[in-house]
């Protein structure tokens, strides 16, 4: 049995001899100290000296402080990581500005890679002053550029009398015998960088590595069909082990912690029954945390701060409305709902804050209430001066003032985790203020972006009670002792990991000095050593892998070929307790397809557009939800023009050109240049009629390209029009009305032509594919044109889709006369209905019967979930409300 996750019996002799214990990381140092304290307490001691155990670099930096106090090293100020990255960003930006031919996409990520490259060179003691080393760097442009950055970085640090923590170790390596020396023992080290070795030699009388003892614990291999099955089986196994022996120590190593942690935590909570009231009772300690930026408290703080920018994302505005940490509106109030719809109707993921404020003001005026968001945004506009520049510490005061305005961190008391998040936020603000040492004055947007970067790098790790079950990363588990250690994700593609040499250091140098991640051989040796260390420190080492990952077959890692295969049954996809609850539940099926009948007390007709009957035909529930409950899915974001805006613009252009031409005779008389002028004039007229908001969202280049596209399309369409029989355009965008039962249907015909026999042809423009079968049958998919035919019963002889689509311009329609190519007069053949509706007159009678039936269905409240075809659901967006998938699953099987 492992005791306290670390057995210190092998270190007791060294402790008695006065050795200082050094570990690779703080986690192991804390674990050894905690075990020592527990052992002293168990022995009855009331007072004892703290155990001298430290993470190796923390201890070396303490020795540097001693050397600095004795003026044995240069009098410089060490920088924090955020400050170091800021200096790198300044260096890289300055170099890029001076060298226009060298382009970078993301300065922030490049700064981290550059700093890592410098760290590697210093820790592996590569002398970049040597000519042979410089030659290798100059063979590759990226490496040569990095050498220029490195020189500029060193000059900036020297000019400001600053240094990095690694520079402190370099200085420390040169003070041999000048500082108090100690004897130190290195515990659980797999590798030691040459610079650390040199620094240890300089400041110690003696240092040695504790040779690990070799054990031969059992090694077991488990294989599963998928990643979900692997994690689910692991969670079930952990619970069984814990319930049999609560003191058994279990370690879980996640090879891909970022993606697997959330899934595993949920499965463990489900198995331990800690999803509800017992949420805080999970007997598992997670070593890996989450970025401070993503915890709700801080996420909502940034949403509030973003109101001080020129633009804000729609998601940030929604967070403002729903956050319990801010002063916000009632999210269920009609004004809030209408405001959110207005936000999404713009179609842009980012909106100007002034636009958001205007929309909030409009929502407030419509409802005649004081909309909190509008009041707050107006207060923000009076408070903030975005363009002034100041140092980070000065912006912290402005940030706090903004958060105070928004009532952050809320009126309700914070729980334990949220207090810890608030404390880390305050410490991060202190680190942000410390950037004054390396930053120039910046504006509000730059300061907020820099603070966001700081929070993204800051990891929030909850302070929870210790537990015998630990979830760790591969390096965090090194050196700890467990009764059982389970390593997940042991696929061949993961263990060993692929080589990732730093792009700013020549691969030849990285290979020569055996730097981390330099090549596949280095990764194999490192991973093998890690597995051996796991095996030495655990009673039983478990390894598992999934045979398929994201649909791709996987093989086990070569590192686990000697493990003994042990089959663990894969649990069912659904938890057993849920299956049991489902079996015990009494299922009561209630058919709820009838809405209250539609009634009006004023005696007037009920009104609606053609889409009402279209939805009733496609799926009665959709008509009920859309036209009676006024529900609709929020639109997606888009770039350029939306499909609806592009269609509306095309309609406007077509209406404008026929206002000029009027009939086919005028069209046929046009020369090529005259037609070009007419097309350009129609396009300019339609675009000029757009709203200022629509025009302003796109630049001049966009509208220039859009005009070219419309011109090509219009010329192609006019070529089709020239082939038609003579016609006269008598109406464009004409408004019509039709009464069906007690429904008044409002219609807008795109165009109505008068033919040679004085009858009318009703045209509906479409930019997509068309099919006349959408008008036919007992449930027509698109009854708009049949409604036009009924609205002008005596005069309409042709209905046609005008498909205005690049390289596919054509007419598709039905009628009593062939008014253009693509118009069919074979009514019965078109319907494939035999003798029914053999002619145009009877077809219109059939349409009236069908459409009046649909109108009556809507009026009486027929609201069954019954999509006419599966494709109807693809454009609906109401599946979460009608639960069409659930309904189909629960339908009883049909028996013959």
Image (cartoon, rainbow, N blue to C red):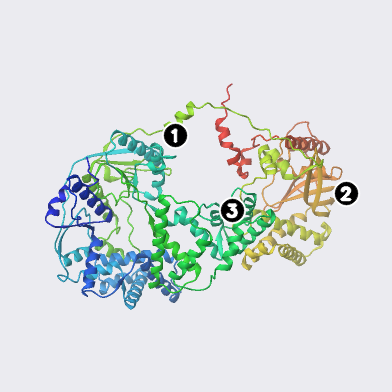
Specify which label sits upstream in the sequence, 3 or 1: 3
Looking at the image, which residue is at 48% across and 26% down?
584
Residues at circles 3 and 1 in contact by the CB criterion of under 8 Å: no
Q: Can you say whether 93 is above or below 48 in the image? A: below
Q: Check disc 1 and report the residue beneath it.
A: 574
How many numbered callouts? 3
Residue that extends furthest to the top in the rendered view of this protein = 896
Report whether 639 appears left or right of 164: right
Q: Which residue in the structure is indicated by mark 3?
A: 329
Residue 521 in view here: yes
Q: Position of residue 578 (x, y in %)?
A: 45, 32
- The residue at 62%/61% (across/down) is 357
Depth check: give the residue in front, 658 or 346: 346
> Upstream in the sequence, badge 3 or badge 2?
3
CB under 8 Å between discs 2 and 1: no
Depth check, front residue: 320 or 25? 320
Image quadrant assignment for residue 556: top left
Question: Badge 2: how crowded within 10 Å, few (<14), some, or many (20+)?
Answer: few
Residue occupying the point 22% across, 75% down: 71
- In the figure, is residue 442 to the left or right of 287? right
Residue lying at the far bottom of the rendered structure: 159
Look at the image and tell me whether residue 817 can be seen. Answer: no
- Of 114 and 652, nearer the camera is 114
User: Which type of secondary structure does the marked residue at label 3 adopt?
Assistant: loop
* Badge nearest the viewer, 2 or 1: 1
Res 758 label: 2
């Amino acid at each position: 049995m492992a005791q306290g996750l670390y057995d210190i019996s092998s270190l007791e002799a060294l402790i008695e001899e006065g050795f200082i214990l050094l570990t690779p990381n703080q986690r192991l140092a804390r674990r050894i100290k905690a075990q020592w304290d527990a052992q002293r307490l168990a022995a009855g001691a009331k007072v004892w000296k703290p155990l001298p155990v430290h993470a190796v670099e923390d201890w070396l930096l303490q020795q540097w402080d001693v050397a600095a106090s004795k003026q044995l090293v240069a009098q410089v100020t060490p920088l924090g990581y955020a400050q170091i990255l800021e200096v790198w960003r300044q260096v890289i930006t300055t170099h890029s500005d001076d060298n226009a031919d060298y382009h970078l996409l993301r300065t922030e990520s490049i700064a981290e890679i550059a700093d890592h490259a410098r760290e590697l060179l210093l820790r592996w003691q590569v002398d970049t002053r040597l000519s042979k080393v410089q030659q290798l760097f100059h063979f590759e442009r990226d490496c040569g550029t990095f050498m220029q950055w490195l020189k500029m970085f060193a000059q900036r640090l020297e000019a400001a009398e600053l240094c990095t923590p690694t520079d402190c170790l370099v200085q420390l390596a040169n003070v041999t015998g000048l500082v108090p020396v100690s004897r130190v023992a290195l515990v659980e080290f797999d590798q030691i960088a040459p610079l650390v070795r040199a620094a240890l030699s300089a400041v110690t009388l003696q240092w040695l590595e504790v040779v690990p003892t070799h054990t031969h614990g059992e090694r077991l291999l488990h294989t599963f069909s998928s990643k979900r099955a692997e994690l689910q089986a692991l969670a079930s196994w952990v619970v069984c082990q814990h319930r049999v022996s609560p003191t058994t120590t279990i370690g879980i190593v996640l090879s891909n912690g970022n993606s697997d942690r959330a899934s595993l935590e949920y499965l463990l909570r489900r198995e331990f029954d800690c999803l509800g009231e017992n949420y805080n009772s999970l007997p598992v300690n997670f070593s890996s945390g989450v970025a401070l930026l993503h915890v709700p408290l801080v996420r909502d703080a940034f949403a509030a701060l973003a109101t001080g920018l020129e633009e804000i994302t729609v998601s940030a505005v929604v967070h403002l409305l729903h956050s319990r940490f801010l002063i916000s509106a009632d999210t269920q109030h009609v004004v809030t709902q209408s405001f959110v719809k207005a936000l999404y109707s713009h179609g842009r993921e980012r909106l100007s804050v002034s636009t958001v404020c205007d929309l909030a003001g409009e929502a407030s005026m419509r409802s005649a209430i004081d909309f909190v968001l509008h009041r707050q945004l107006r207060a923000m506009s009076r408070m903030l001066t975005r363009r002034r520049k100041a140092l980070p510490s000065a912006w912290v005061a402005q940030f706090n003032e903004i958060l105070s305005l928004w009532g952050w961190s809320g009126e309700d008391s914070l729980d334990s985790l949220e207090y810890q998040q608030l404390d880390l936020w305050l410490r991060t603000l202190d680190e942000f203020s410390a950037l004054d040492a390396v930053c120039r004055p910046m504006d509000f947007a730059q300061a907020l972006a820099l603070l966001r970067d700081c929070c993204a790098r800051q990891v929030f790790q909850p302070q929870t009670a210790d537990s015998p079950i630990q979830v760790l990363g591969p390096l965090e588990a090194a050196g700890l002792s467990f009764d059982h250690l389970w390593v997940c994700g042991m696929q061949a593609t993961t263990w060993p990991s692929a080589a990732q040499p730093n792009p700013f250091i020549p691969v030849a140098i990285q290979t020569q000095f055996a730097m981390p991640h330099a090549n596949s051989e280095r990764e194999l040796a490192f991973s093998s050593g890690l597995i051996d260390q796991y095996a030495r420190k655990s009673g039983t080492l478990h390894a598992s892998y999934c045979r398929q990952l994201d649909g791709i077959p996987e093989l086990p890692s070569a590192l686990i070929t000697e493990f003994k295969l042990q089959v663990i049954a894969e649990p069912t996809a659904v938890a057993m307790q849920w299956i049991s609850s489902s079996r015990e539940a009494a299922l009561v099926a209630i058919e709820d397809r009838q809405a209250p009948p539609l009634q009006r007390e004023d005696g007037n007709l009920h009104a609606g557009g053609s889409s009402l009957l279209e939805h009733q035909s496609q799926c009665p529930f959709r008509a009920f939800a859309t036209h009676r409950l006024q529900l609709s899915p929020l639109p997606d974001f888009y770039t350029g023009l939306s499909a609806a805006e592009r269609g509306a613009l095309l309609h406007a252009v077509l209406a404008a050109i026929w206002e000029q031409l009027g009939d086919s005779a005028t069209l046929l008389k046009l020369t090529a240049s005259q037609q070009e002028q007419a097309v350009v004039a129609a396009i300019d007229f339609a675009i000029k009629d757009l709203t200022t908001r629509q025009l302003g969202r796109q630049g001049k280049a966009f509208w220039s390209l859009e005009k070219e596209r419309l011109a090509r399309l219009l010329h192609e369409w006019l070529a089709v029009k020239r082939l038609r029989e003579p016609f006269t355009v008598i109406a464009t965008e004409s408004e019509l009305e039709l009464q069906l039962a007690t429904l008044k249907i409002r219609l807008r015909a795109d165009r109505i032509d008068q033919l040679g026999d004085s009858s009318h042809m009703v045209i509906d423009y479409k930019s997509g594919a068309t099919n006349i079968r959408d008008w036919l049958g007992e449930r027509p998919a698109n009854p708009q044109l049949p409604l036009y035919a009924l609205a002008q019963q005596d005069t309409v002889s042709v209905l046609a889709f005008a498909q205005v689509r690049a390289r596919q311009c054509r007419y598709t329609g039905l009628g009593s006369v062939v008014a253009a190519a693509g118009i069919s007069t074979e009514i019965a053949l078109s319907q494939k209905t035999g003798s029914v509706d053999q002619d145009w007159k009877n077809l219109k009678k059939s349409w009236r019967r069908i459409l009046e039936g649909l109108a009556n269905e809507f009026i009486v409240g027929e609201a069954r979930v019954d999509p006419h075809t599966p494709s109807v659901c693809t454009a609906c967006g109401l599946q979460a409300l009608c639960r069409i998938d659930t309904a189909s699953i629960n339908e009883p099987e049909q028996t013959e």
